[in-house]
Image: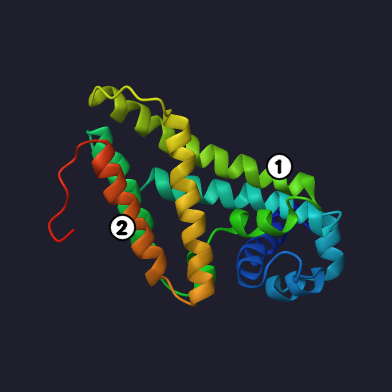
Amino acid sequence: MPPKDQGVTKTRLLDAALRVIRAQGYSATSVDDLCAAAGVTKGAFFHHFKSKEALGIAAADYFSAFADSVFAAAPYRQLKDPVDRLLGYVDFRRAILQGQLPDFTCLVGTMVQETYDTHPAIRDACNKSISDHAAMVEADIAQAMKARGIKAEWSAESLALYTQAVIQGAFILAKAKGGPQVAAECLDHLRRYLECIFHHPARKGQ
């Protein structure tokens, strides 16, 4: 298989992992499922990944890189006020609650719930993905605290992780209730909480 074709096949498998695992979970997804979704042979799968676990680790990194590119290009990143950027982040997360549940729920959040005890390597890859994303939010929180002169017992890191806890919990509720509305409402509550912390005027209608 030419090197270019090998790269295409690997990407197809990773894209398939994002779709299938978010739809049916890591444990319920077989190598055969992934091959069928990617349109490749089992031999091609094992040429690129020695096991389903190896693909899970790679998929976490792949998903993280994709998410980083999406959020880096989001319009709220251009806002000068760090509080506006933080609130813009929440608004952006709400805006992308579109399509079917597997389209907007989190791959790494889905995988870590199933694998935290049985597949520590996948757990660690998911933790890195979530923590790296939280660090991006943390940077805006730290700047917002400085800009508003906020000195608190809590840290920018702990608040950043709290935002991720709300988001991941919102995804679980969306799955339980079969739609994004509950997740949108959770993000609205998160926005109101952040407005209170940073003494930011609430939006009309809140």
**Residue receiving disc 1:** 124
- Separation of marks 2 and 1 at Cα, in angstroms: 30 Å
Q: Amino acid at mark 1?
A: Asp
Q: Position of residue 1 (x, y in %)?
A: 81, 59
Q: Disc number at residue 147? A: none
Q: Position of residue 164 (x, y in %)?
A: 48, 47
Q: Residue furthest front?
A: 153
| Mark 2 residue crowding within 10 angstroms, few (<14) / some (14–19) / many (20+) | some
Residue found at x 72% / y 74%: 39
Q: Are marks 2 and 1 in contact (CB under 8 Å)?
A: no
In this rendering, position of residue 154 left or right of residue 21: left
In this rendering, position of residue 67 left or right of residue 151: right
Q: Residue furthest left?
A: 204
Q: Is residue 75 visible?
A: no
| Mark 1 residue crowding within 10 angstroms, few (<14) / some (14–19) / many (20+) | some
**Residue receiving disc 2:** 188
Residue 8, above or below 190: below
Q: Position of residue 2 (x, y in %)?
A: 77, 56
Q: Mark 2 falls on what kind of element?
A: helix
Residue found at x 18% / y 58%: 206
